[in-house]
Image: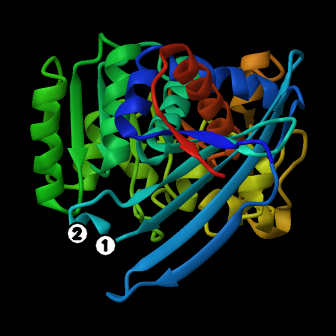
Amino acid sequence: MSQESLLFLNRPAVLACLEKFDPVEVVAEVLRDQAAGRTEIPTEGYLPWRNGNGAYSRAIAMLGALHRETSSVYGMKLINAAVDNPSRGIERAGGLSFAFNPETARPELIAEAGYLSAIRTAAYTMVSLRELGPEQWDGLTLIGTGALARAHLDLLVRNFPEVRRVTVFDLSAERSAQLVAWAAGQHPQLTVAVAASAAEAVSASPVTVTLTTSDDPYVPASWIRPGSFLAHVSLGDLTEEVFLGAEAVFGDDLDLIEENPRRILGRLLQEGRVTRPGTAAAPATGPGRTVDGTLGQVLLGLVPAVRPSTGYVVSNPFGMSILDVGMIDAVRRTAVELGVGQRLDLL
């Protein structure tokens, strides 16, 4: 029997690879592939439970495939989380990303996925800001100050170096203080201030990114100043009225969003109060609106980009597995070029 092995990358090795390519461009390329119909996104595996502390915990297995002219790419992200992990001194979410050999179907690379997953999410936000954000903006608000917040600041300084003012809010004052201290060391060019409330934070900046675990909507339209952009990365921060009153609403994959009623936009789509492009909301269900399109369609020029003017624009990604597959493929190719990682024998 032939010897089989795979390459393992810990976080330092992943970070070394990320320094050599632009994750924002990787995500943009995958979004174009998706809009052009060159992707496969199977139903994700989802396993929830309560841990010994009674805290919500879950495991998500996300498979995907990219079919490009030169080759096809297959992979998976296994990302697990417990909401009380920060109290243990570890990040809320962590896991592994896999790159599969397209001929043998064997995993040929496994990488620590906690930071890689966060950077993929932040990269989507950066693409959406580039294509749909305000024409000019001078400040960013982050609601939630965990690992995703750090990844967003890492990419903010790389992609929007002119933006120096950051406002943050978290229910935990300790986590907010930790983010401020981290940013002072990692990105001293940023001025990071802690808001006294979520309302103050949202009104402080023309761009707000929600990065919480909330499933209880709390952001009303009255908090949002004209000309704002909201990246609704988490599940349930924005109220229904925010979606229904927006100048424009964009997603990443409307099928995935609609299938998940835990998301506000998903429930609105199921109820018919928000509908797909080209259709109208059913009058019987009350006031409604139409989703303007997906970010991939904007990148391909299939739907027009809408930037905020007198109102606000909402970006609501589901978080597609193919973005993780595209990212781990870029990491795999870079790891081979750099010669980083640990070779593990399987047989």
Around disc 1, counting alpha carbons within 10 Å, would you say few (fewer than 14), some (14 to 19), or many (20 or more)? some
- Seen as rendered, the residue at the extreme front is 1
Residue 1, relative to residue 18: is it above or below?
Answer: below
**Which percent across, then down, holds residue 319?**
62, 47
Kindly identify the amino acid type of the residue bearing the numbered disc 1. Answer: Asp
Q: Which residue is mark 1?
A: 84
Q: Which residue is mark 2?
A: 88
Residue 110 sits in quarter = top right
Numbered mark located on residue 94 in the image? none
Nearer to us in this view, 19 or 118: 19
Kindly identify the amino acid type of the residue bearing the numbered disc 2. Answer: Arg
Left/right of residue 174 with respect to residue 324 in the rendered view: left
At x 31%, y 12%, the residue is 161
**Which percent across, then down, holds residue 213?**
42, 63
**Which percent across, then down, holds residue 137?**
36, 18
Task: Work out how far the residue at label 1 is from the one at label 2, CA to CA, in angstroms.
Answer: 7 Å
The answer to whether residue 249 is seen in the rendering is no
At x 19%, y 23%, the residue is 187
